[in-house]
Amino acid sequence: MDPQAAKYIGAGLAVIPLLGVGLGLGTLFASIITVMGRNPSMADAVKGSGFMYFAFIEAIALFALLVAMLLLFVV
Amino acid sequence: MAHSPLAQFTIKPLMPLEIAGYDVAFTQSAAWMLVAVVCATLLMTLSVRSKAMVPGRWQNVSEMLYELVFGIVKGNLHGEAKKYFPLIFSLFMIVLMGNLLGMIPYSFTFTSHIIVTATLALFVFIFATGLGIYKHGLHFFSFFLPAGIPWWLAPFIVIIEVISYLSRPLSLSVRLFANMTAGHTMLKVFAGFSVMLIAVTFGAVLSILPLIINVALVGLELMIAFIQAYVFAVLSCMYLKDAIELH
C-alpha cells in the first residue's frame, strides 16, 4: 500500500473513539435532563459537576483528534 | 503554510538570544506569559483595593474566582486547605489567563503548547509525590496497594496502580493542551471555509454561514477555556489529597 494512503486510513481509524464519546455525552446529558426534570431544585448542583465531566469526556475525543492530526501533519 | 490552520501555533522570537549554544530567545509565547501574569496580578490587586463591603463589579469578579478555587481546595484538603491554596490558585489563574488571553484575535495561546502544560503538570506531580514521601516516608508506597486485596491479585494491582500514577502528569498536560489546540484549530478551519466559499457562485452570501458558526464556537471556546482551568485546579487538588491522605 502507498504509505500516504495508509497515513490517511490510519487518521480515519484514529477517530473511531468518537463513537464512545458520543455515547458517553448522550448518557451524561440524558441523566442531567432526567434529574432536572424530576427534581428542579437540584438543577444547579447537577449542572456544575455535569459540565466538569463533560470536559473529561470531551478530552477523550480530543486525544483521538490529536492522534489523527499527528498522523496527518507530523508523521 | 501561511493559510494552514496550524500556522497560528508557530513560535516567533521577538528578541533573539543565544547563551552557550542554546537558543533562549525571548519569544511571543514568553511575552504572552508575562502578559498573563501581569493581568492576573492587576486583576487580583486593583479590584480589591477599595475593600468595599458591598463589592463592585471588579471586586465581585475577583471574589468569585477566589471563592470558587477555595471551595475546590476546601472540599479536597479540608483542614490543610489554607496551606496549599496559594499553589492551586496560582496554577488556576495562570491557566485561566493563558486560555482567555488566547481568545483575543491575533494573540497567542501559550497553553496550546505541550511543553508549557507539561511543565505545569510535572510541577504538580513532582510536588505531590515529594509531599507524600516527606509526610509518610516509605509508607507512601502503600499507596500502590489498596487494603483488602487478595494476595494473588496484588502484583497485578500494584503494576496497574503504578502505571496509572505515572500517567497522571501525561493526562493532566495533554487534556489542557489538546483542548486548546483543537479548539483554536477548529476556529481557523471554519474561518477558512468562509474564505473558500467566496470563490463559488453566491459565495459572498453563503460565506456568512461559517461565520455564524464561528461566533457560536467562540462562545463555546470561552466556556472551555474556563472549564479547563477549573478541571486543572480540581485534578491538582485531588493529586495533593492522594499524597496527604493516601487513599
Image (spheres, helix red, strand yellow):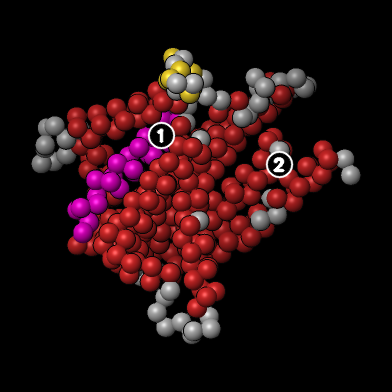
The stretch drawn in magenta includes residue B217: no
Q: Residue at x 39, y 52 (%)?
A: B125
Residue found 33% across the figure and 55% down from its top: B130
The foreground one among B88 and B160 is B160
Quadrant housing the C terminus of chain B: bottom left
Amino acid residing under circle 2: Leu
Helix or strand or loop: what does disc 2 sit on? helix
What residue sits right under mark 2 in the picture?
A71
Label 1, on which residue?
A: B98
Residue range in magenta is B80-102
What mark, if any, has residue A63 been given in the picture?
none
Residue B241 shows up from this direction: no
Q: State left or right for residue B180 relative to residue B83.
A: right
x, y percent for residue B143: 39, 69
Q: Main secondary structure of the magenta part?
A: helix
| Quarter of the image where the N terminus of chain B is located | top right
- Give amino acid for label 1: Gly
Alpha carbons under labels 2 and 1: distance apart: 27 Å
Quarter of the image for residue B185 reads top right
Image point (23%, 62%), residue name: B78
Question: Is residue B189 left or right of B13 when viewed as pictured?
Answer: right
The answer for which chain carries disc 2 is A
Q: Tell me the element at label 1.
A: helix
Q: At which x and y percent is residue B60?
A: 22, 40
Q: Do pointers 2 and 1 mark residues of a single chain? A: no
Farthest residue, direction right: A1
Q: Can residue A13 be seen in the rendering of this structure?
A: yes
